[in-house]
Image (cartoon, rainbow, N blue to C red):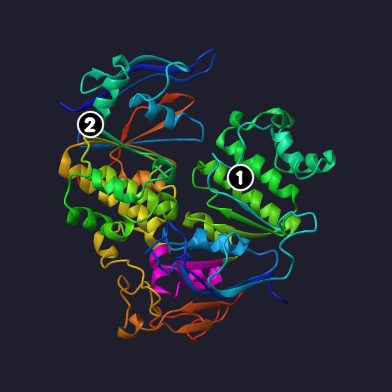
Amino acid sequence: MKPQIELKDIAYVPSEDKLLSKGKNFTILSNISFAVAESSILGIVGESGSGKTTLIKLITGILGPTSGTIEYSFPLNRSNGVQQIQILFQNSEQIINPLRKVKSLLDDITKDASEQNFILDFLEIPQEMLQKKGYQLSGGERQRAALARILLAKPKVLIVDEPFSAQDPESKQNFVKLFQKLNKEFNITILCVIHEIDILEDFTEQLLVLFGGKVMEIGASRNIFAKPVNPYTKFLLEAGNYELTENDFSGSNIRLNNSSGCPYFDRCKNKLEECEISVKKMELTGRIVYCNNPLNNYPGEGTDGSLTLK
Amino acid sequence: MLNVKLKNVSLIINNKPKEILSNLDFNLSKNNIYTIIGKNGAGKTTLLNTIIGILDEKFYLISGFVKIQNINILDLDEKGRRILRKKLIRIVLQDAIGSFDPLKTFQYYFNLLKCEQSVLDNLLKSFQLQGSQKLSKLYPYEVSGGMAQRISICLAILAKPQILILDEPTSALDVPIANLVSLKIKEYIKSTNSIILIVTQDLKFADKVSDYIATLQNGKLQEFRKLKNTNGK
C-alpha cells in the first residue's frame, strides 16, 4: 500500500538570505527519510532541540525543505481551501482568539449545526461553552475548543505538538483516550510530538527517534520499547528509571554541521572511530536503525526472531 | 535569616464569590527545595504570582501576609517590590520563549550577567546547549521551546538568587534533560544555601528533585511533606 506521507532525504537549513539570520547557518534537520501509513499513530521523540517541531512544520508545509521531497497520497488543500493536515499547537494560551465566541470560531469552518453538535458531543463539550469568549476558557477548555474547530475541518492527518505538557495526569489519560478514539472512529492519522515516555508505549504504534536533527531509529513502538537498538534510544527510554549523573551527559552536543557522522558521537558509549565520519543504515524486521555499533540482541539477527512488525 | 512565610493568605478576584486561594499558611526555609503539585487550574501559578507580588490589586483582592526575609511584600509599593525582587528572587516562567523580549537576541541577556564568559559557557554546555557565542546571535523565536527553557534556567542560576522560583521547568523537556535539570538544581542549592520553589505537573521530576512536596487543591494547600533520601541529607 502506498504510504500516506513519505519523506525522502529531507534536510532543512534556515535560509541565509534573510536579514535577521545573518551568519547563523546550521543544519536543523538532515537525512530524514520515513513513511507514514494511513490511519496510524506515529510518536516523534527526541532530545529538546533535536528538530521535532521543525519536522512537523515541514510535514504541514509551513516550512519548505532545503532539499529532498515530501509526497502525499492526497491533496494538501481541499477545493474550499481547508487544509487536510491540521496541527494542534503546544501553546494553549495562543490557539484561541480571546475576543471571539467559540461559536463564531466554529462557524468559520461550517455553519451546519448538526455537524457542530456531533463534534461537540464527541469531545464532551457542553453547549454553554459556545457562547463563551476565548478569554473566559481555561487552558484545557481552550485546547478542546481548538480541537473541535480542527475536527470540523475533517482532516486526514492530525498533528499534535506536546498536547500533554501542561496537563495533570488525569487529563493526560483523557486526551490519550480521545486521540485513540479519533484514530479508530474517523481514521485520522495522528502524528504526536511527545516527551512522556510512559504514555508513548500504549499510545503510539510507530516511533520516530530524533537526535541532533537526524533519525536514530524508527519502527513499531512495541519493538523499540522491548529492545532499543540505537544507544541513544535506550538512553532516552530508560532515563526515567534511574538517577543520571553528569557523566551520562559528558561530551558536548554541538551539531556536526553538514557532517555525515552520527550526531550522538560525543556522548555515545558504544561509539566506534568511524561514527564520526559516517553512519550505517540498518533495516531490521519492522524498523530502520542508523548506527554503526548497535546494541546486542537486536531482532532480525537470529538471537530473537520473535519481534516482528505489528 | 532567609525565609519565606505565608500567613492566612487568601485571594479572590474582585466581585467573584469563589476563593482562588484560601487561608494558605506555610514557611519556606533555606537549603530546601519545595515543590507544589496540583491539577490544571488549581491556582499554582497564581500562588507564585502572589508570592512575588505581581498580581494587579485592581483585579485581585489579597488578604494575609507574604513575608520575604520578614518584609511583607504586599505592604510595599511597586518600586519597593521591584527592588526586593531584583535583590532576592529569580523566576523561570512557564512560557519560556514568551518570557524573552522577541526583539532582543540572547546577547542582551548574556550582557546583563556579571559572571565571566567561561562560567556561562560551561553552564550552557552542561545543559547540552551550544556556547554563548552561537546562542548570542539568536532571537528567542529561533530556538526551540526546550532550549529557551534551559537558557532561562541558566540565566536564573547565574544571577545567584537567594530565592529561585521555577514554574513548570520541565514542560518542554525530554526525560534525560529533565533529569539533568534536577541535578543542576540540587547542585545549586548545595552551593548557595538558597530556597527553591517549584511548581510542576511532572510527578517523577517532583519526586527526584524535592525535599518537600505539597498538593494544591481547591485553593487549599496541604502541609509540605518531607521526602526521604533526597539530596543525600
Q: Nearer the viewer, mark 1 or mark 2?
A: 2
Could you say where residue A301 lies in the image, as x and y percent from the top left? 49, 86
Q: Is residue A213 magenta?
A: yes
Residue at label 1?
Answer: A174
Q: Helix, strand or loop at disc 2?
A: helix
In the picture shown, does residue A141 fall above or below B130?
A: above
Query: In this image, A28 relative to B67: left or right?
Result: right
Could you say where residue A226 lies in the image, as x and y percent from the top left? 49, 69
Could you say where residue B169 lies in the image, as x and y percent from the top left? 38, 45
Q: Residue at x 17, y 38 (%)?
A: B193
Residue B88 numbered mark, or none: 2
Dividing the picture into quadrants, the one containing residue B210 is: top left
Dividing the picture into quadrants, the one containing residue A105 is: top right
Q: Residue at x 61, y 45 (%)?
A: A174
The front one of A123 and B125 is: B125
Q: How many marks?
A: 2
In the picture shown, does residue B64 fall above or below A277?
A: above
> What type is the residue that disc 2 sits on?
Leu
Query: In this image, A79 relative to B227: left or right?
Result: right
> What type is the residue that disc 1 sits on?
Asn
